[in-house]
Amino acid sequence: MFKRSFRGSSDKGIAKSNKISKKSFNDVKKQRMRDALNNQIITPDTSPSIGGGSPKLNSAIVTLEVGPGKRLFAAHEDLLARSPWFGEACRAQFFSSPGQRRISLPDESPEVLSVILEYLYKGDYTPRLVHDRKRDMWALEDCGVDLTMSPRSNTTTTTEKKYVGFNESATIYHHGVGDYILRDTAVYCSAQRFGLPELQRLALRKQGLQSGIDVATILRSARFAYANAPASDSRLRAHYLALIIRSRKTFKKSGTMQMEMEKGGTQMFFDLFVAMCNHIDDVTEIGQVSPFS
């Protein structure tokens, strides 16, 4: 004989109320986005143009041997594969046992490779980009000084080695150069090599927020950019040409600049000459007066 269970409408309401409500993934993501925007921090969730992500649990670990000192790094294969260059290198070792997968990068800088891995995992690298919504400006987070640049800000220094708002993490020692260069320039060139265009744009934007860099470092970094970025990619070269023209009062008094120009032998100075001519032409057209009259 079957037993029937009688439960009133009030009992159903109680049963429903006892169920634990669960937020959907989209709700959680939207809340994280709102919190990040309130804190003025750009993260992989709040910016669709920034990469970064969590590795799969079953992703193989790849060892990276970097620089002349063969410094070792470890990274998940599925995140490395977001770079076409690393993806091809990982596929070449497909039949190797997981514990023996190793990629050698003797010409790469360990500091730059560390930045690339941080970007692949987090979608940004230290110091992170922060957007000030009130002033509608970008700045670098936690640098100890205000590195924000606005169209009206005057970053020209009166002496060759005057550091105004200088961020120590702005430069790295590069073994290929044998001296210090701007880190974001090295990151830009390596990102181009590894097929990470979003990281290129991020590095170029961050470099534009740096200030107080001495003339010698700028010229070394510019030479590095010309030597390591393809001529077809003119963004980084144009950045340095514009920087020199904007700060021409400093560069024309610089003994370092004079020695570099006398030494010659680089495409940069011809490009600078063309850029200066174009600048003069623009000024002439605006004022309709010859700058030499």
Image: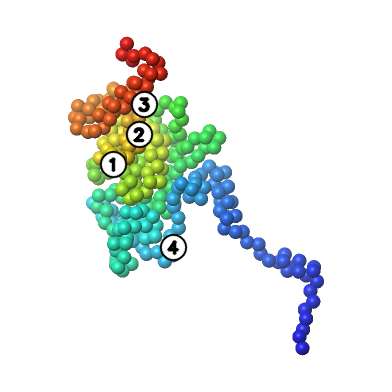
Whether residue 217 can be seen here: no
Q: Which mark is residue 230?
A: 1
Disc 2 to disc 1, C-alpha distance = 14 Å
Determine the secondary structure under disc 1.
loop
Residue identified by numbered label 4: 56
The amino acid type, in three-letter code, at marker 3 is Arg
Which residue appears farthest toward the top when viewing the image?
293
Residue identified by numbered label 2: 239
Asked if the residues shown at circle 3 and circle 2 are in contact, with their CB atoms under 8 angstroms apart, the answer is no
Determine the secondary structure under disc 3.
helix
Image height check: is 277 above or below 240? above
Q: Residue, x 37% and y 48% (percent of image)?
A: 196
Q: Quadrant of residue 147?
A: top left
Where in the figure is residue 285, as x and y percent of width and height? 38, 18
Disc 3 to disc 4, C-alpha distance = 47 Å
Q: Is residue 256 left or right of residue 199?
A: left
Which residue appears farthest toward the bottom when viewing the image?
1
Q: Residue, x 73% and y 69% (percent of image)?
A: 15
Residue identified by numbered label 3: 246
Asked if the residues shown at circle 1 and circle 3 are in contact, with their CB atoms under 8 angstroms apart, the answer is no
Asked if the residues shown at circle 2 and circle 4 are in contact, with their CB atoms under 8 angstroms apart, the answer is no
The amino acid type, in three-letter code, at marker 1 is Pro
In what quadrant of the picture does the N terminus appear? Answer: bottom right
Asked if the residues shown at circle 4 and circle 1 are in contact, with their CB atoms under 8 angstroms apart, the answer is no
